Image (tube, grey):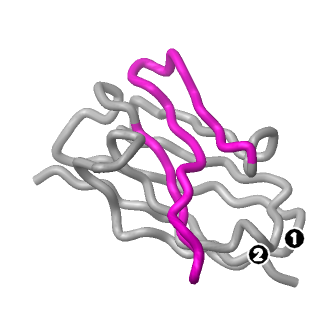
Amino acid sequence: QAQLVESGGGLVQPGGSLRLSCTASGFTADRWAIGWFRQAPGKEREAISCISRRERDTFYADSVKGRFTIIRDTGSNAVYLQMDALKPEDTAVYYCATPCTAPYHYYGQGTQVTVSS
């Protein structure tokens, strides 16, 4: 059964860093574009990053460009989202999904990121 599982969320102070993991099972992740989106209470879902098959292309939303980095780890069948210089407005539930835009074939249960002092 194919699935994606996110982990790595938590509470961090403004300016801090977190690395989210998205581990695939039941399929080979590097044959698919994998993306991250987030949803905060009362706000619309926001697609924030995507990495294409074989890492040829990456995408970042303006809201995270220069602070977040998407990384593919073929050996672990995983995709990571390195988040630096976090801001309170980054607080949301973060999901990984494939493909990078809806409708998604698969997405995980999400991991909560809270940026607060």
> Which residue is identified by label 2?
115
Q: Name the quadrant containing residue 31.
A: top left
**Location of residue 48 in the rendering, given as x and y in whole percent from the top left corner:** 59, 48
**Location of residue 82 in the rendering, given as x and y in whole percent from the top left corner:** 67, 48
Residue lying furthest left in this view?
1
Q: Name the quadrant containing residue 30.
A: top left
Instruction: Estimate the spatial distance between the alpha carbons at disc 1 and disc 2, rounded to whole Å.
Output: 6 Å
Of the pair 89 and 23, the residue shown nearer to us: 89
Of the pair 100 and 76, the residue shown nearer to us: 100
Reply yes or no: does residue 43 show up in magenta: yes
Note whether 63 is above or below 94 in the view shown. above
Note whether 11 is above or below 108 in the view shown. below
Look at 56% across and 57% down and name the residue there: 46
Secondary structure of the residue carrying tag 1 is loop
Amino acid identity at mark 1: Pro
Secondary structure of the residue carrying tag 2 is strand
Look at 63% across and 75% down and name the residue there: 10
> Which residue is identified by label 1?
14
Task: Answer with left or right where residue 93 lies relative to residue 60.
Answer: left
CB atoms of marks 1 and 2 within 8 Å: yes
Reply yes or no: does residue 19 show up in magenta: no
Q: Magenta stretch?
A: 34-62
The C terminus is located in which quarter?
A: bottom right
Note whether 44 is above or below 105 in the view shown. below
Task: Answer with left or right where residue 68 lies relative to residue 31.
Answer: right
Mark 1, Cα crowd under 10 Å, few <14 / some 14-19 / many 20+, is: some
**In the image, which disc is placed on residue 101?**
none
Look at 47% across and 42% down and name the residue there: 79
- Report the number of numbered marks: 2
